[in-house]
């Protein structure tokens, strides 16, 4: 009798868009909820409750610096951690702040280098600065794995002696390619000699969950993180600014966050971000191994499905373990997304930041192969992805591909 009515029961959707945003971990919510109602006071206040909030923020900053330092203790200092509202704001402060500082001491128009597959929050900033005639810029080409061409970077640097900043995201948000930031830093060091420029910035928002980020070995001057990508609070993030990095604030108001990000600090978001980073650092190795097995299983099955191909590399060293990006030959990506949604699987066509645009082709896939930007789906696994969901996903892909 029951089986006759099962088709009318609403089935829970399987969330496979973790690269877009992660659910807030319940352990993070517990910490945040304790503070939201009890310690609402302004940390700039001089009375006891305000001072207590300020001390908690300072403690979170110190603890986060330790987490980011990893095994190499004290490589990140507390005063290098700036709390922001997320990756986009961190990227804006980093790029626009460096350009603004340059113009304090120079008349020559500066040059910026990015990759051709940067996130919109990098690409659009640079294009906007160029339109305003404040900078010139170049894009580094990528190879068939979605990894930047180091030789092309060297050529661009040699042709543009006024380069002040190179910004390359550590992990691409659409095709999951891992960029050789250490190698980029090495190239830059050789050019710098006794000069402070060019600086190196990386958007590491997609990397923190699964890569061992060692700041001292990476050689970056600026790094962006987003709490919404690591099971932390929405609208929370970090901009790491290495000491002595030439940068100006782009906002003005109070002197919070060492003058780099004015406005009353959000205690619950900051402490929630601290908790999220603690969980990630503790569970990273185990979770990475778990998702790698799932990813490789999906890749092995996809390779057997007609008219479906994988965008980018399948090697662990070149691709983040939770990313699957696949092309459906001659099919419309948005139509595929809706079909997957109807089958109960929530995925995306690419970066969610472009979904509301009339043309939502994947810039990264187009740069990678040129023929699949409008025919590809991004699937991103996460902390609550199960093997049952993975097996069902393969069946759903096979179904929509026909």
Image: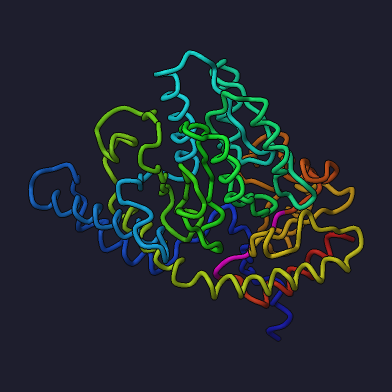
Which quarter of the figure is the N terminus placed in?
bottom right
**Furthest-top residue in view?**
107
Left or right: 36 with respect to 201?
Answer: left
Residue 333 visible in this rendered orientation of the protein: yes
270 vs 64, nearest the viewer: 64
Give the image location of residue 180, x and y in percent. 63, 51
Give the image location of residue 336, x and y in percent. 78, 53
- Residue drawn at (30%, 53%), measured in percent from left and top? 61
Left or right: 255 with respect to 285?
Answer: left
- Residue drawn at (58%, 70%), measured in percent from left and top? 288
Above or below for 248 versus 336: above
Query: Is residue 380 one of those drawn in magenta?
Result: yes
**Furthest-bottom residue in view?**
1
- Residue drawn at (50%, 55%), measured in percent from left and top? 217
Query: Is residue 363 one of those drawn in magenta?
Result: no
Residue 128 visible in this rendered orientation of the protein: no
Give the image location of residue 300, x and y in percent. 81, 71
Give the image location of residue 322, x and y in percent. 64, 63
265 vs 147, nearest the viewer: 147
User: Which residue range is magenta in the image?
Assistant: 378-383
């Amino acid at each position: 009798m029951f089986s006759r009515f099962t088709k009318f029961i609403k089935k829970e959707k399987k969330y496979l868009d973790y690269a877009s945003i992660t659910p807030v971990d319940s352990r993070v919510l517990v910490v945040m909820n304790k503070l939201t109602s009890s310690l609402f006071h302004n940390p700039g206040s001089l009375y006891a409750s305000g001072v207590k909030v300020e001390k908690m923020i300072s403690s979170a900053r110190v603890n986060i610096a330790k987490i980011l330092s990893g095994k190499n203790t004290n490589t990140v200092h507390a005063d290098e951690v700036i709390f922001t509202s997320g990756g986009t704001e961190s990227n804006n402060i980093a790029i626009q702040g460096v350009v603004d500082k340059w113009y304090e001491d120079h008349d020559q128009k500066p040059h910026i280098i990015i990759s051709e597959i940067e996130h919109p929050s990098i690409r659009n900033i640079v294009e906007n600065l160029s339109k305003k005639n404040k900078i010139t810029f170049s894009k580094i080409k990528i190879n068939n794995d979605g990894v930047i061409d180091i030789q092309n970077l060297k050529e661009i640097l040699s042709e543009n002696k006024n380069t002040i900043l190179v910004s390359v995201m550590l992990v691409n948000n659409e095709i999951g390619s891992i960029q050789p930031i250490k190698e980029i830093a090495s190239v830059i060091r050789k050019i710098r000699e006794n000069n402070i420029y060019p600086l190196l910035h990386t958007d590491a928002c997609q990397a923190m969950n699964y890569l061992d980020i060692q700041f001292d070995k990476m050689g970056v001057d600026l790094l962006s993180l987003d709490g919404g990508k690591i099971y932390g609070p929405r609208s929370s993030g970090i901009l790491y600014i290495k000491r002595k990095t030439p940068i100006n604030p782009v906002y003005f108001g109070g002197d919070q966050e060492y003058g780099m990000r004015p406005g009353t600090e959000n205690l619950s978001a900051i402490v929630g971000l601290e908790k999220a980073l603690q969980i990630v650092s503790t569970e990273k190795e185990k979770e990475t191994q778990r998702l790698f097995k799932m990813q490789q299983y999906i890749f092995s099955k996809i390779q057997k499905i007609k008219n479906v191909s994988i965008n980018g590399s399948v090697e662990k060293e070149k691709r983040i373990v939770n990313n699957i990006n696949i092309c459906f030959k001659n099919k419309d990506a948005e139509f595929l997304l809706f079909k997957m949604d109807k089958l109960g699987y929530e995925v995306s066509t690419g970066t969610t930041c472009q979904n509301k645009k009339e043309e939502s082709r994947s810039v990264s896939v187009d740069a990678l192969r040129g023929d699949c930007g409008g025919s590809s789906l991004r699937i991103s696994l996460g902390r609550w992805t199960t093997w049952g969901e993975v097996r069902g996903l393969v069946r759903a892909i096979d179904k929509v591909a026909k």
